[in-house]
Image (cartoon, helix red, strand yellow):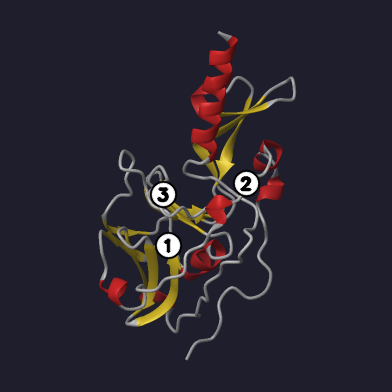
Amino acid sequence: MKRLSLLAALVASLVFVTGCSSMRPPGRARYDATAYKPRNPDNVRVKVSLQNRAVYVMEGDRPLLVTATAIGLPGKPTPTGNFRVFAKIPKKRSGSYGFSVNGDGSIRPCTSAQATGRYVGFPMAWWVEFAPGYGFHEGSVWPMPRTHGCLRLHKNVAPKFYALTKSGTPINIAQTQPEDATIGKNLKRPTDYADPDPPNSVFVSDAVFSTPTGPLLVEGQ
């Protein structure tokens, strides 16, 4: 019985830690993407290609940011359609998936309903919400569907995406986008998904939220 309990705990740990909001330390190969300052922030729009697992932040025909993203699992798909940004939280935590910080000092993955101690949600830094419960946020970018429907961005890119968007920014999420054949054709992909997770103690602390250094947006042509 004890072996079954340990196995169940291990499975739960893997599911929750690699779910919607998994955070990982910097990878062996640094990943980044240049983000250009818009001439008119009111003209910024976001396009997402689920097949190419790509995010295109555009100002007219001018790409401001092109980056890889992790998308939702088949059973928890990323919603498609036209949306608008309506909430932004730089240090967001999940209200559904996280950890139980218990009185004996243990920290265990759980849902909010399963917490036996103090519940602390998974970190979802640089949260940009476009539908209730769905948003862009920092996290490991797997090369296959991996999230609970959110769109995860590499830790070096998420704050740049956050800076480019504002309340009301339009977002189109579709299976494909015209940009897939041009600026998204040879898109670089991060490998942070292969790195080990930090200890659970880091997940539940404020240390998990990093502050970017240097300017996020650069002047473009």
Q: Is residue 128 above or below residue 35?
A: above
For the residues labelled 2 and 3, the Cα–Cα distance comes to: 21 Å
Inspect this view and state whether residue 111 appears: no
What residue sits right under mark 2 in the picture?
Answer: 196
- Percent x, y of residue 95: 50, 36
- The local crowd at label 3, few if under 14, some if 14 to 19, many if 20 or more residues have their Cα within 10 Å, is many
The amino acid type, in three-letter code, at marker 1 is Ser
Q: Are marks 2 and 1 in contact (CB under 8 Å)?
A: no
The amino acid type, in three-letter code, at marker 3 is Cys
What residue sits right under mark 3 in the picture?
Answer: 150
Q: Residue at x 40, y 79 (%)?
A: 63
Chain-order first, disc 2 or disc 3: 3
Q: Is residue 26 above or below residue 60?
A: above
Looking at the rendered image, the disc whose residue lies closer to the viewer, 2 or 1, is 2
- Secondary structure beneath label 1: loop
Q: Is residue 21 above or below residue 118?
A: below
- Percent x, y of residue 218: 56, 81
Quarter of the N terminus within the rendering: top right
Q: Disc number at residue 167?
A: 1
Q: Are marks 1 and 3 in contact (CB under 8 Å)?
A: no
For the residues labelled 2 and 1, the Cα–Cα distance comes to: 34 Å
Looking at the rendered image, the disc whose residue lies closer to the viewer, 1 or 3, is 3
| 174 or 27, nearer to the observer | 27
Q: Residue at x 58, y 64 (%)?
A: 156
Q: Horizontal placement of 43 versus 154: left or right?
A: left
